[in-house]
Amino acid sequence: MPLAPAHASALGQGNTAGSWREHKTTQGYLIDVASNRVVLHGMAMPHSPRLHQQQLIWLESGERTLICTNPTCLRAEQAMPWQAVSETSIEPPGFTRGLDCFGELAAVGVSQIHETDLSGALPLEARCRERHCGIALVDLSERELLARTSFNSGMQEIFSVAFLPGWRNPVVIGPNPELDQQPTIRHNGPSVI
């Protein structure tokens, strides 16, 4: 029997194509799948909710944040504003979309802002002038950004990321291999090569 997700996210409550765009900074919400009820609201484009090590972790793409909280606080009868339950907020560098967790690490997909669909009035735009596509690695226990890598050609958006246990040095090469073979990893510790 396949496992069902514990939570799902939505960008808005409209029922017409693209209606979420009008209030994209305030209408996002998180749903408890088992009870089919909204548990958090008021988010700017929530994405990729995960239960990991007794925490609920999700991305708020419009704010460029990774948010961690204790899921037991979501048992109230009424949906709460997400700020009321947020315990930790980490800011990977860019438009956050796609999350996977493994041990004390979180991999976060970081995309360039898709100008035609998303730009305009997103909170992250004021704080994030650099627009790269890549992956950020976050230490969940220390709540800090450990490293990031950028793709230099061929990729502007990431929708999902995954840890590959047992694999070493997986490679993504875009249409310009000369650019993509240049190391672009930035980190806060000793070399990981």
Image (cartoon, grey):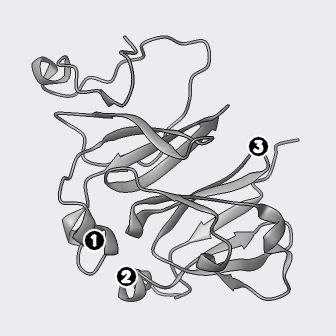
Label 3 neighbour load within 10 Å: few <14, some 14-19, many 20+: few
- Circle 2: residue type: Arg
Q: Earlier in the sequence, mark 3 or mark 2?
A: 2
- Circle 3: residue type: Gln
Label 1 neighbour load within 10 Å: few <14, some 14-19, many 20+: few
Q: Position of residue 1 (x, y in %)?
A: 88, 41
Q: Are marks 2 and 1 in contact (CB under 8 Å)?
A: yes
Q: Secondary structure at mark 2?
A: helix
Q: Secondary structure at mark 3?
A: loop
Identify the residue at image location x=31%, y=49%.
157
Identify the residue at image location x=72%, y=80%.
38
- Circle 1: residue type: Asp
Which residue is identified by label 2?
A: 21
Identify the residue at image location x=31%, y=68%.
124
Question: Residues under labels 3 and 2: Cα distance?
Answer: 33 Å
Q: Nearer the viewer, residue 3 or 47?
A: 47
Q: Quadrant of the C terminus?
A: top left
Placement of 121 over or under 105, stated as above or below: below
Which residue is identified by label 1?
A: 117
Question: Residues under labels 2 and 1: Cα distance?
Answer: 8 Å
